[in-house]
Image (tube, helix red, strand yellow):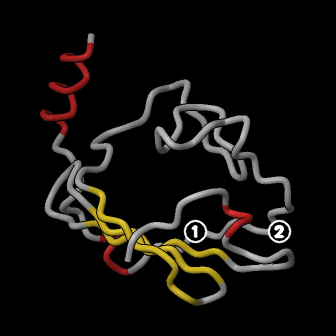
Amino acid sequence: MEPPHGPPEAHAAAGDHQVRLEFEYDGGGLGKGATADLYLDGEQVATVRIDATVPLAFSGDETMDVGSDTGTPVSDDYTSRGSIFTGRVHRVQIDLGDDAHAHDHLIHPEDRMRVITTRQ
């Protein structure tokens, strides 16, 4: 299934809706790929393959916004001014699955130090 295109209001009628994203990490180390499935009111409306994820941390000046993105856009198709959600977000909930307790994604202290000193 291809991801939807265009502004979100073109894909959902006015009113209360539940939007859910299920993120399935490939595992087996840092920066691996993942699959993301998007649901609207319990119905899957899109799925996308993510070839690689951020291995350690985002930049210190990146933002975590709901309804708009004032930092780095998630897509070149996204424009900060034209893509602001003007509705009301009642709740954001993050649930971690049982596999979140696996430790195969953790970086060894020696590797972490090597990455940090490489950036300087």
Residue 30 sits above or below residue 37 on the image: above
Residue 110 sits above or below residue 88 on the image: above
- The quadrant of the rendering that contains the C terminus is top left
Label placed on residue 90: 2
Left or right relative to 49: residue 88: right
Identify which amino acid the numbered label 2 is placed on. Answer: His
Question: Which structural element holds mark 1?
Answer: loop
Q: Residue furthest bottom?
A: 42
Separation of disc 1 and disc 2 at Cα?
14 Å
Please identify, in this view, whether the residue under mark 1 or under mark 2 is nearer the observer: 2
The image position of residue 21, as x and y in percent, is: 52, 71
- The quadrant of the rendering that contains the N terminus is bottom left
Q: Residue furthest top?
A: 120
Residue at x 38% of width, y 37% of height: 57
Left or right relative to 99: residue 13: right
Residue at x 40% of width, y 73% of height: 47
Label placed on residue 94: 1
Residue at x 70% of width, y 79% of height: 18
